Amino acid sequence: MKLAKALTWLLLPICILLLARSAFAGPARCSYGNQDSTCATPIVSGWQPQPQCSTAAGWTTVGASRWIGSQWTAPQCNYQAQPTCPPGDTEVSPASWNGSSWNGPACQTPSRQDPSATCTAAVPGGYTLNAAWTQVSNPDGATAAADLGLPGFASQWEAYPVAGPTYQGVCNSYNTWIAACIVAPNGQVAVLMEQAFNQTSGSCNH
């Protein structure tokens, strides 16, 4: 009897140790395959920011992104390319973006448009134009533009007659002038005043 009790007390710790090792060998509680109603739902992703269209120049939002329960849809975006001047024109200032559309650009087409207002404003004081500006073909236009310090040469326009200060010819005095307007590709102009009757020789029939 004493021997049986001794064996019991000897084997009891060994059995407890074996049972404990068997229990700890299983999956951890609330791990995959070992869930119950007391386990919280694991968080598998963090906060998802709402996707937006680019705010760079030319981009607008046609349709905002929507939350569909588990993720955002892609926004509908539209891109407008920056407009430029037509071929052959000179860009005075580029187009600007106002947040929804482009403004401009400002273009100059001096070779195809009558620059009347700009040429008239460049006429020196003391002269009065009595005729409209007319585009002329003058091979000396490029030379005149270079002499005036204009950036290149686009066209030349003339107005005749122009009333101005009196000047003396061989036989008579005159006040009729020709206004020559030199136009650069960027729209800049300069006006030269030329005497319409600049007689340097001949007879006065006296």
Image (cartoon, rainbow, N blue to C red):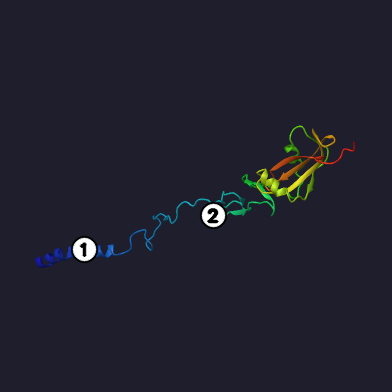
Q: Residue at x 78, y 48 (%)?
A: 136
Which residue lies at the image location 63% right of the left edge and 46% below the top edge? 96
Task: Residue type at mark 2: give it.
Answer: Trp
Give the total number of marks visible in the rendering: 2
Relative image position of residue 138 (x, y in whole percent): 76, 50
Q: Position of 59 compared to 191: left or right?
A: left
Left or right of 136? Residue 32 is left
Above or below, comparing residue 68 to residue 186 in the picture: below
Residue farthest to the left, as pictured: 2
Label 2 crowd (10 A; few <14 / some 14-19 / many >=20) = some
Q: Residue at x 12, y 65 (%)?
A: 5
- Helix, strand or loop at label 2? It is loop
The quadrant of the picture occupied by the C terminus is top right
Crowding at label 1, few (<14), some or many (≥20) Cα neighbours within 10 Å? few
Asked if residue 102 can be seen in this view, the reply is no
Q: Amino acid at mark 1?
A: Leu
Q: Nearer the viewer, residue 192 or 102?
A: 192
Check whether the beta carbons of the residues at disc 2 and disc 1 lie within 8 A of each other. no
Q: Secondary structure at mark 1?
A: helix
Question: In which quarter of the view is residue 128 placed?
Answer: top right
Residue sitting at x 16%, y 66%: 11
Q: Position of residue 192 (x, y in %)?
A: 73, 40
Q: In the rendered view, tell whether residue 117 sits above or below residue 26.
A: above
Residue labelled with disc 1: 17
Report whether 114 appears left or right of 39: right
Q: Nearer the viewer, residue 167 or 101?
A: 167
* Mark closest to the chain's N terminus, 2 or 1: 1
Q: Is residue 82 visible?
A: yes
Image quadrant in which the N terminus is located: bottom left
Residue 63: percent from left, percent from top = 61, 52
According to the picture, the residue beneath numbered tag 2 turns out to be: 72
